Amino acid sequence: DSVSDAVGETNACVTLVYSTDDFETKEFERRILSTSGFVEDYVDGEVVSFEEYQTALRESGMHGHMKNFMIFQNEVERLASKTPKDLSELFEEVSGSGDLKKEYNKALSKMEKCEAEVTFIFQKKKSLNNAKRALRQQKEEAETYMQTKKLLEECDNRRRLFKIFHMEEDFNGKQEMLKSTEQEVASAEEMHRAQLDQLSAYRRDISSLRIEEAKSEQRIRRAKKDQDRLHIRAVEANAEIAKRRSKMDGLRLDHARQELNEQIETIRKLEIMLSDTEDSLAQAKRESDEHSMRRISHADLDEYRRLQELCKTRNCVVQAELNLMNRNASIRKQRLSVLQSNIAEDEKRRAKIAADLEELNKKKQSTLAKLNTAKELVRSLEADLISQESAAKENKRQRAELHTKCENLTSEIHINKYQMEEFNKRNTMVHSLRTLKRLYKGVKGTLGELCRPVNRKYTVPMRVSSPNRSDAPCQPFRLA
């Protein structure tokens, strides 16, 4: 340090002497003029700029970012409170590796893009090879298919000729059978008409018997109506209970439906919110993809275009091969269509012959069905006659039994009514005597007032004669 009091200037300088392992020295000096605030940097006594001074320090393994080569207590505390990420950034800044971070990231992204392009080209090549292999297999399968199809057509033609020969023979035999069946049907229809006449006579007799049965049933219904009247009140009470229960169930169902509709509405709102969030996420992803595509360099674009042109040429070659195969396939399809038309004509002829045979079979079956129905009608008529005779006898017997039962019931009802009337009379007399015994002497009034029904509770004002006053009204007396 040098100080000049006469001029009034104070200068300050700091000198750092750096010695290497080869005993070579290097001086770094910085001078500060306090009046002007100007700073001068010296390396081995020569004036240099600030950037040159920093590069010389960095080449010697020293960094000018450190504070006067000293660490104070507050710096120690600040370092201790830092996170691992902040400490790694500090070490990168001190070591100087932070300056190379951008270049490293660029090289890493370029390497990843190149690897992705290589894998894409490899997969494309692999898929093209697989497509060629599949096309080759399809070609072989088509050739084998055409050979087998020719053999199948020859076999089908032989089989059709064989069927047509046997169909003609069956057709002639079935025509003869149809003629014989038609004659049998005509004779069966004549017999059927005669049986219908007999059946109409039998039905007249049955209708008269049914009228008598209906009359007896009406008498029985009248007797049952008296019994059914007693159950009407119980049925009405059950109906009212069922109505009230149905109303309660309806209220519960309405409440449950309302809750279900509310839950459905909330689910619909949640689905709308979820779709909105998915749309926003997709839009953000698209924006990030567009932003990443903008960062591609010119060299990468050239490489991408070159690969695109190469892929286009390969696609053209594959497309030409596919077009050739499609032409061959179209020619084969035309041949197949001609063969299919021939087969369709043969099938139409065969279908026509089969339809004729089916019509003949249907006619035969209908005639047989008519014969069977005629036979069954004859049997059923005979069985109905027997059953109707037995049913008529049984109805007469049941009608006689019902008549006797009705007479017995009416007689029993009259007897029961007479007994009930006698019982009620005796009961009223007994209760009237009991009530008279409970009363005081000298009761005035008619016997009809005292002999009312016992099951009702009522009050009857009475006059009791006393030695003092015979006409004084007494308190109302309750008859039990």
Image (tube, grey):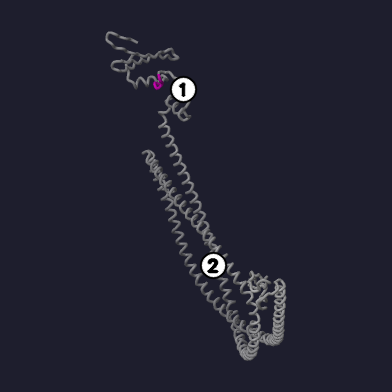
Q: Is residue 380 magenta?
A: no
Quadrant assignment, res 101: top left
Q: Which residue is mark 2?
A: 153
Say which amino acid is labelled 1: Val
Residue 354 in the figure: left or right of residue 409: left
Q: Nearer the viewer, mark 1 or mark 2?
A: 1
- Magenta segment, principal secondary structure? loop
Amino acid of disc 2: Glu
Q: Please say if 309 is above or below 211.
A: above
Per the model, the C-alpha gap separating discs 1 and 2 is 98 Å
Quadrant of residue 232 within the rendered picture: bottom right
Label 1: how many Cα within 10 Å (few below 14, some 14–19, many 20+): few
Residue at 29% of width from left, 8% of height from top?
5
The magenta segment is 63-67
Q: Look at the image and tell me whether residue 386 can be seen.
A: no
Q: Is residue 257 visible?
A: yes
Quarter in which the C terminus is drawn: bottom right
